[in-house]
Amino acid sequence: MMHSLRLRLSVISVTLLGGLLLLTMALTYWMVQLTWQARVDEILQNTATRLLHVITDAAAPGNRAFLELATSTRADVLVQLVSPQGEVLFASSNAFSRAPFYSGRDILLGIHYVTVKMDMAPDLRVLSVPVSRQGRPTVVLQVAMLVDVAQEMQRSLILWLGGMILLLLVAAFFLFSSVIRRALRPLDNLARMALTINRADDLSLRIPIYGYDDDEVGQVISAFNTTLERLETLFTSQQRFLADVSHELRTPLTVIKGSVGLMRRSQAFDPELLDSIEAEADRLTRMVESLLLLAKAEAGKLTLNRRTVDLDAILLDTMAAMQVLAQDRVQLVLTDLAPVQAEVDADRLKQVLVNLISNAIKYTPDGGQIFIGLQVEGKTVRLTVRDTGPGIPEADLPHIFDRFYRAEKSRTRRKEAGGFGLGLSIAYWIVRAHGGTIEVSSAEGEGATFVVVLPLRPSEDD
Ligand code: ADP
């Protein structure tokens, strides 16, 4: 419970609210005090002004007008006349004390307000006005009022306020904690859903978004779902990969096992069977090598041995070698050949050319043609391999560079052609490692065109 986010948020909110309310309470206390003090001071001042009018410079106590006025003031206003030495010369009948209300020396200096605390009696607000003759104070007029009612009001107001604030804070705590609980409920659901996915081992499940999808919680859920999606893709592609590899391994292994069995039964050395064993072993080796290369490339660890080479020479070499494979079945035609030097990994680039041209030869029917070109375009070089074969169905085009992908037709029709569906993936990764692009365009029945664009020099960030 101590670690509950809800509890922490509630406590923080209530503490902040409490602080603000206390501040308001303090301000109220101060404002009330200022208000009643201003009112009391005004009354004291009015009385003092009226009395000062009738104080003559003759000794005040004998002054009738003063006496009359002093005894007819408001019942709650007390009047005293005090000599500079501090004796009380006159006190109105309601003045309960025979001592001056206030006897600090500062009363002789000028008009002076003070609140006097008295033992056993309520506080007094006192106004002292010195009356001077020929520059010397002769008497001090003191007008005072008891302020117990105002103070009592002020105190009880604060008690009330304090009590109400306390109740308010308790109510606020429950209110906040229920609001926060509601706001956090989607997170609870998120956690529960995540656990369910764990338990069910089912990456295809997604967490539904409650409420808004662009608020904070919605964003967390979206991010989580994106992660799930990515994991699911990765996971399925790993599974498919394993299935593909196992599938590809089965045929050669069956052939090898069958051939060995045949030889054992016939107890004879059969060069044909040995050839087929060797061919299958070679196929397996090629596949494993291709897979290793792809694994490296996909992990971004494909190292290129770049040197400046003549691309045109490499192209011509490869074409000559491929012509042997094509025999007279299909014709290799060179359309453009720009003399160009580029900084590339010659062996790997040759592999790209071999893969593209051998595909073209493999899939083009007898009597077809394959057009090969090399052009320079600014700081890039463009390699084209176009054939007059059956082309690639549109549905297959987006997947053609995936590993183990073979278009459905070629899968059934030319199994003996012996591809694993790795050639184009390898070409793709090699071109990519060079910082170039490879693209295919084709329409069924109209042949396929592969275009590789490579930078002549590696760019800075390669
Ligand atoms: P494979 O070893 O099967 O040739 P690739 O990765 O080289 O594998 O090619 C993948 C698939 O692309 C092939 O199975 C084939 O269906 C299709 N393909 C590639 N090149 C061509 C082409 N020139 N003409 C028609 N289809 C092609």
Image: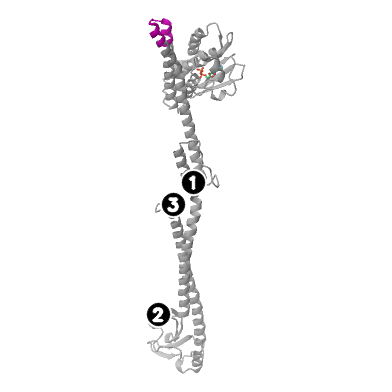
Q: Which residue is mark 1?
A: 189
Q: For disc 2, does the CB lie below 8 Å from ligand 1?
A: no
Residue behind mark 3 = 5
Of pointers 1 and 2, the one earlier in the residue sequence: 2
**CB at disc 3 and ligand 1 closer than 8 Å:** no
Q: Between label 2 and label 3, give the one nearer the viewer.
A: 3
**Looking at the image, residue 343 lies above or below residue 81:** above
From the top left corner, tell me how far across and down residue 100 is, in percent. Answer: 40, 86
Front residue of 135/350: it is 350
User: What residue sits right under mark 2 in the picture?
Assistant: 117
Q: Where residue 248 appears, x then y in whole percent?
A: 46, 19
Mark 3 or mark 1: name the one nearer the start of the chain: 3
Q: What's the amino acid at mark 2?
A: Lys
Nearer-the-camera pick, 371 or 6: 6
Chain part drawn in magenta: 261-277
Q: Is residue 448 visible?
A: yes
Q: Amino acid at mark 1?
A: Asn
